[in-house]
Image (cartoon, helix red, strand yellow):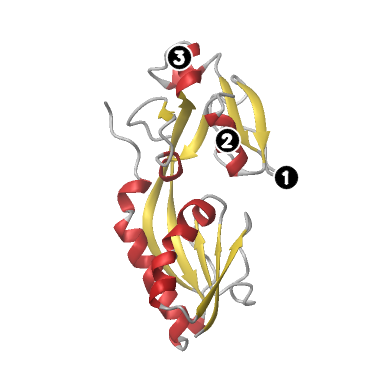
Amino acid sequence: TGTVTVSATEGIGTEWLAPALVAFHQQYPDIHLNLLIEARAVDLVQREADIALRLNEPKQPDLIAKRLTGMAFTLYASRRYLEQHPPINSEGDLLGHTFVSLAWPGQPNGIMIGQPHALDGQVRIALSSNSPTAQVSAVRAGFGIGVLSCRWAAMYDDLIPVIPGHVFAKTDLWLVTHEELRHSARIRAVFDYLSERVQQSRSQFKPPNKT
């Protein structure tokens, strides 16, 4: 019983985590789940959250971390956009195409945030946002090409991989908690459940196969 606060980024937290926790709630109805959706890494040591799903390995030695799976990102566009623009068979064909990017304060506005690319400055970014949800919506609307999580993009039939089988970037998904895990049954229950659910869903995090 009690409250367990889980921190996650937008996308993982809103599109995957919230629905995935329904079965947990049915099993443990007396545990109140509190989801924190933030771009920043919350401070688990200071108990801003009990558990976090992170895209980078934590460095603090007093945290407990488990690598869950690799995450792939690749280029997606709407079916309508691809029908109205020249075909793309390689990264070199991206010149002249329009992009939708993420842009956070203090970060350069490139094709993919935090990942400098040779095409930065050579392609036109028509729209940028600090919200991954807004980026996905803009790509689906036909604004341009975006680097999206393969797991997130797989949820929409109207998002097409621009170069099937191509991986633009990779990272790892980590499940992180603090030392209280060793003493709290409710935190342990959520931690183990999330670990199991990600393992069951690992195929969703991989890039689409070549056609």
- On the question of residue 62 being in view, the answer is no
In the image, which disc is placed on residue 89? none
Q: What residue is at 53 percent from the left and 30 percent from the top?
A: 140
Name the N-terminal-most of marks 2 and 3. 3
Q: Tell me the element at label 2.
A: helix
Q: Please say whether residue 171 is visible from this viewpoint.
A: yes
Label whose residue precedes the other's in the sequence (1 or 3)? 3
Which is closer to the viewer, label 2 or label 1? Answer: 2
Label 2 to label 3, Cα distance in Å? 18 Å
Residue named by callout 1:
105
Residue drawn at 64 percent across, 77 percent down: 46
Q: Is residue 9 above or below residue 26?
A: above
* Residue that label 3 marks: 83
The disc labelled 1 sits on which kind of residue? Pro
Residue 137's disc number: 2
Marks 1, 3: nearer the viewer: 3
Circles 2 and 3 in contact, beta carbons < 8 Å: no
Q: Are marks 2 and 1 in contact (CB under 8 Å)?
A: no
Pinpoint residue 189: horizontal percent, then vertical percent: 41, 78
95 displayed left or right of 109: left
Q: Is residue 91 above or below residue 51?
A: above
Q: Which residue reaches farthest right? A: 105
Quadrant showing the C terminus: top left
Which residue: 40% across, 73% down?
26
